Image (cartoon, rainbow, N blue to C red):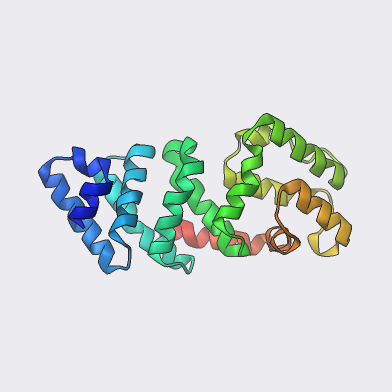
């Protein structure tokens, strides 16, 4: 555990000896829970260097990953690895990044659409140009001004997914009753890779979404 921290953690390298000892214990405990030392070390550095948390708060958050992962039927190793990987795109959220990540994981759990795909879908709204194009197409398909491109740019990733889902409901349409060509048009405009993923994303009930989110929040 200590070797991995020395090699991969900037936080560990700059910490006092007593703090280093506690970090070593934390990573050791997580290893017993099935999380590799490398993954724990990387997650720790994201919590401290990207999210700006002090070491005690970061280690507490890292320990809670186990209960959150369990609520979403994930291993702690998978949850932590995806947290580290997602941080490359979610880092701009700063201290709010963990909350956004948990929200996205809840959506991934409810729909079966992977975290990486959800990030790809929401990534098109990171620029005004990309947001304007997607919003214009979706509003055209749905028949009204249900989405606002500027608002989509400033939303978090989990909010973007929720807002796209809500726009279909607000239009008076339901995914299950849409024609094949309507579904394909929405799929393309939303940046979803195929019809299966689109059906998972837009066809899953709001109740399932909310239930998954509530489970994860309760465990956080």
Give the residue drawn at x 28%, y 47%. 8
Query: On the rendered structure, is 85 left or right of 108?
Result: left
Identify which residue, 191 or 172, lies in the foreground: 191
Residue 7 in the image, given as x and y percentages of width and height: 24, 48
* Left or right for 49, reference 125: left
Image position of 48 (left or right of 217) = left
Q: Is residue 24 positioned above or below 90 on the image?
A: below
Residue 67 on image: x %, y %: 38, 63
Residue positioned most to the left: 17
Give residue 104's position: percent from left, percent from top.
55, 53
Find residue 151 and report its image quarter. top right
Q: Residue at x 61, y 42 (%)?
A: 123
Q: Quadrant of residue 78?
A: bottom left
Task: Say if residue 220 shows up in the picture.
Answer: no
Residue 11 makes an appearance in the image: yes
**Residue 47 vertical placement versus 172 (above, below):** above
């Amino acid at each position: 555990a200590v070797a991995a921290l020395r090699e991969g953690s900037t936080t560990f390298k700059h910490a006092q000896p007593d703090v280093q000892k506690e970090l070593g214990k934390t990573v050791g405990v997580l290893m017993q829970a099935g999380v590799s030392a490398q993954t724990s070390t990387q997650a720790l550095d994201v919590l401290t260097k990207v999210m700006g948390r002090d070491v005690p708060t970061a280690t507490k958050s890292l320990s809670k990953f186990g209960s959150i992962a369990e609520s979403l039927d994930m291993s702690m190793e998978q949850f932590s690895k995806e947290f580290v990987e997602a941080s490359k795109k979610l880092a701009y959220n700063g201290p709010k990044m963990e909350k956004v990540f948990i929200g996205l994981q809840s959506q991934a759990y409810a729909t079966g659409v992977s975290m990486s795909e959800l990030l790809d879908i929401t990534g098109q709204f990171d620029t005004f140009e990309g947001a304007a194009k997607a919003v214009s197409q979706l509003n055209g398909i749905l028949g009204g001004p249900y989405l606002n491109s500027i608002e989509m740019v400033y939303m978090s990733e989990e909010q973007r997914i929720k807002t796209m889902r809500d726009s279909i409901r607000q239009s008076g349409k339901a995914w299950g009753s849409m024609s094949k060509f309507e579904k394909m048009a929405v799929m393309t405009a939303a940046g979803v890779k195929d019809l299966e993923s689109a059906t998972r994303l837009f066809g899953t009930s709001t109740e399932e979404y909310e239930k998954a989110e509530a489970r994860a929040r309760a465990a956080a």
